[in-house]
Image: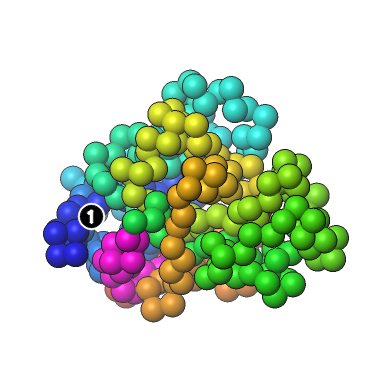
């Protein structure tokens, strides 16, 4: 384990607005896990917004790789665009994909740009990942029929393998808010369930395992492709090959969407007043903790 913790990792963050929250994310991550971090892949997902992050990139001088994709795909569905994965210019418009292909590290840490870290999560993940393909919070269980029925959870997802009949009964009795978007083929091979994924807001990927099996090198859907949600299709695909991830909760290590109570990171973008307040909260923390005037 000591040799594992002596190895550097890379970080990738996709950035869509939230400059002050982005700064808090990366500076707090560096504060606690910086001794393990080599490069930060900083991908800007909104055309013409690069200047918003100048104050942060100056602080990160020498530690970041700036990438601005030709296309800004954001969260648009990839469901009917599988054929485009062969083209690098399209593939690199998906979240995290440029870093996925560019990193030379065994481990890649993915983070949202609205996370507040308050402990060394990178060391914790390295100590937890074991032989798994990834580690982090598992599942969007609040949407899941199996969770509503009390038969599955983040910790138990590997153990719960419903039959086709069980799955169909679950979705009839507890359809959930996104049931109409569930992929039809899951009715024939339901596990992992549609709401299962490795949550992208803070997770670690073993690239020695993940990169060879993920497009463009393997058959699995890119991690950042949007189907039901980001990474749901990748999660399903790698499990069909026999891989699994290990669930590790956020408690004691970080808060997601911390600056905007009552909102998740995506919803905040559509409420101008709450967005302004969240950015003010982040700016205040930057001034108090990191010396920004």
Q: Residue 97 is drawn in which quadrant?
A: top left
Q: Residue extending furthest bottom?
A: 252
Q: Is residue 82 visible?
A: yes
The number of callouts visible is 1
User: Which SS class for mark 1?
Assistant: strand
Q: Residue at x 56, y 23 (%)?
A: 84
| Structure colour scheme | rainbow
Residue 277 magenta-drawn? no
Q: Is residue 199 above or below residue 188?
A: below
- 210, 20: nearer the viewer: 210
Q: Is residue 178 visible?
A: no
Q: Residue at x 46, y 71 (%)?
A: 249
Residue 126 magenta-drawn? yes
**Residue 103 percent location from the top left of the image:** 28, 39
**Residue 53 percent location from the top left of the image:** 37, 48
In the picture, the quarter occupied by the N terminus is: bottom left
- 270, 205: nearer the viewer: 205
- 71, 18: nearer the viewer: 71
**Residue 34 percent location from the top left of the image:** 22, 61
Q: Is residue 191 above or below residue 224?
A: below
Q: Residue at x 75, y 52 (%)?
A: 164
Sort mark 1 into few (<14), some (14-19) or many (20+) by Cα contacts within 10 Å. Answer: some
**Residue 216 percent location from the top left of the image:** 43, 28
Span highlighted in magenta in the image: 112-130
Q: Residue at x 79, y 56 (%)?
A: 165
Image-based side of 21 in relation to 236, left or right: left
Image-based side of 150 in relation to 42, left or right: right
In the picture, the quarter occupied by the C terminus is: bottom left
Image-based side of 189 in relation to 206, left or right: right
The residue under label 1 is 37
Q: Residue extending furthest right?
A: 172
């Amino acid at each position: 384990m000591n040799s594992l913790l002596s190895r550097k990792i890379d970080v990738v963050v996709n950035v869509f607005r939230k400059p002050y929250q982005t700064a808090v994310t990366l500076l707090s991550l560096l504060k606690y896990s910086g001794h393990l971090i080599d490069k930060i892949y900083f991908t800007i997902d909104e055309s013409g917004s690069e200047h918003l992050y100048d104050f942060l990139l100056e602080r990160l001088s020498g530690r970041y790789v700036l990438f601005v994709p030709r296309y800004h795909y954001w969260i648009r569905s990839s469901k009917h665009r599988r054929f485009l994965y062969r083209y690098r210019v399209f593939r690199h418009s998906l979240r995290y994909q440029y870093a996925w292909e560019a990193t030379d590290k065994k481990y890649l840490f993915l983070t949202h740009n609205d996370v507040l870290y308050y402990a060394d999560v990178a060391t914790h993940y390295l100590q937890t990942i074991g032989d798994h393909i990834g580690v982090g919070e598992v599942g969007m269980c609040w949407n899941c029929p199996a969770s509503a029925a009390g038969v599955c959870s983040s910790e138990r997802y590997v153990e719960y393998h419903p039959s086709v009949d069980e799955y169909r009964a679950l979705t009839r009795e507890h359809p959930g808010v996104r049931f109409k978007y569930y992929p039809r083929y899951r009715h024939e091979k339901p596990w992992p369930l549609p709401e299962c994924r490795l949550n992208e807001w803070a997770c670690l990927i073993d690239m020695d395992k993940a990169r060879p099996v993920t497009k463009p090198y393997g058959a699995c859907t890119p991690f950042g492709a949007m189907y039901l949600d980001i990474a749901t299709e990748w999660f399903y695909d790698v499990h069909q090959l026999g891989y699994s991830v290990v669930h590790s909760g956020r408690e004691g290590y970080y808060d997601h969407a911390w600056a905007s109570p009552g909102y998740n990171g995506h919803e905040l973008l559509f409420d101008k007043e709450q967005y302004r307040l969240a950015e003010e909260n982040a700016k205040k923390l930057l001034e108090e903790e990191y010396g920004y005037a």
